[in-house]
């Protein structure tokens, strides 16, 4: 097989392998689902705002470019390029997180930019309502995929993580946690290497950076 195909497959399998470990930890450690109205309030200082229009409703996100400058710059590149438009939330685990930013409805993966350095030791915690970057077992492998924590996931923070690196938080849902909670409650299935795939596709119809006021 071509080398680039093998490398791509290897990276995807690593992601799912790491995800399986996270799921086991989440099932063991995750608290009961928080009320739909509750959202975490970590030390987020939003410097830029992004609106995700989804098939389930609107989600407004604040990004902290001061504490996660490389991660925010990377995310904004994908937003401005229209990368997220038409992609789905391909991994949904109710008392853990919802993940998107990589696959189309027919589960084709869009090309990405080179990976970015991990910024997980920036003081921001994986609390309910926060956004963090998905990655493989390589700490510096995040590209376009992100997740929204649906509960407090302390075991994903660098100081508590199994690998000592954790996952980089770079933003927070400011409006639309009811939409996040609707997405996390959707029935899921398995299809090929995809576990916890929503039975009915949940699509990011458009992602836009809000103009500065």
Image: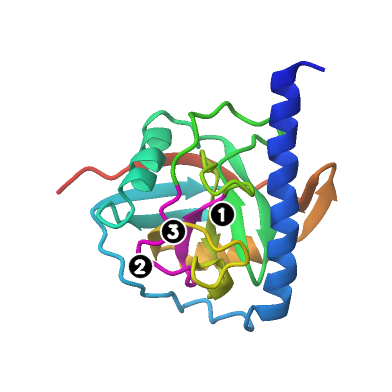
Mark 2: give few (<14), some (14-19) or many (20+) Cα within 10 Å.
some
Kindly identify which numbered label has been placed on residue 123. Answer: 2
Mark 3: give few (<14), some (14-19) or many (20+) Cα within 10 Å.
many
Q: Which mark is first along the chain, 2 or 1?
A: 1
Q: What residue does disc 3 label?
A: 120
Which of discs 1 and 3 lies nearer the camera? The answer is 3
Position of 142 relative to 92 (above/below): above
Q: Given the current orientation, which residue lies at the most extreme front position? A: 164
Estimate the x, y position of residue 136 in percent, counting from the top left. 63, 46
Dividing the image into 4 quarters, which one contains the N terminus? top right
Estimate the x, y position of residue 96 in percent, counting from the top left. 63, 68
Q: Which mark is first along the chain, 3 or 1?
A: 1
The answer to if 26 sits in the magenta stretch is: no
Q: Nearer the viewer, residue 33 or 144?
A: 144
Q: What residue does disc 1 label?
A: 56
What SS does tag 1 mark? loop
The answer to if 128 sits in the magenta stretch is: yes
What SS does tag 2 mark? loop
Q: How is the image coloured?
A: rainbow
Q: Nearer the viewer, residue 140 or 126?
A: 140
Q: Main secondary structure of the magenta part?
A: loop
Task: Say which quarter of the image contains residue 73.
Answer: top left
The magenta-colored residue range is 118-134
């Amino acid at each position: 097989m071509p080398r680039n195909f093998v490398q791509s497959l290897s990276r995807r399998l690593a992601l799912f392998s790491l995800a399986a470990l996270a799921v086991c930890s989440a099932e063991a450690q995750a608290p009961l689902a928080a009320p739909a109205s509750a959202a975490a309030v970590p030390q987020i200082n939003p410097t830029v705002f992004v609106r995700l229009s989804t098939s389930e409703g609107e989600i407004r996100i604040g990004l902290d470019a001061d504490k996660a400058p490389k991660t925010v710059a990377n995310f904004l590149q994908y937003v401005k390029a229209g990368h997220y438009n038409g992609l789905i939330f391909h991994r949904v685990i109710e008392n853990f997180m919802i993940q998107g930013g990589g696959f189309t409805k027919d589960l084709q993966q869009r090309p990405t930019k080179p990976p970015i350095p991990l910024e997980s030791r920036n003081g921001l915690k994986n609390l309910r309502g926060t956004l963090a970057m998905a990655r493989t077992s390589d700490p510096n492998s995040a590209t376009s995929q992100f997740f929204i924590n649906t509960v407090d996931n302390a075991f994903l923070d660098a100081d508590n993580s199994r690998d000592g690196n954790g996952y980089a938080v770079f933003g927070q849902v400011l409006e639309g946690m009811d939409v996040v909670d609707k997405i996390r409650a959707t029935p899921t299935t398995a299809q090929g290497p995809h576990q916890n795939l929503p039975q009915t596709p949940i699509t990011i119809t458009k992602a836009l950076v809000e103009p500065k006021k």
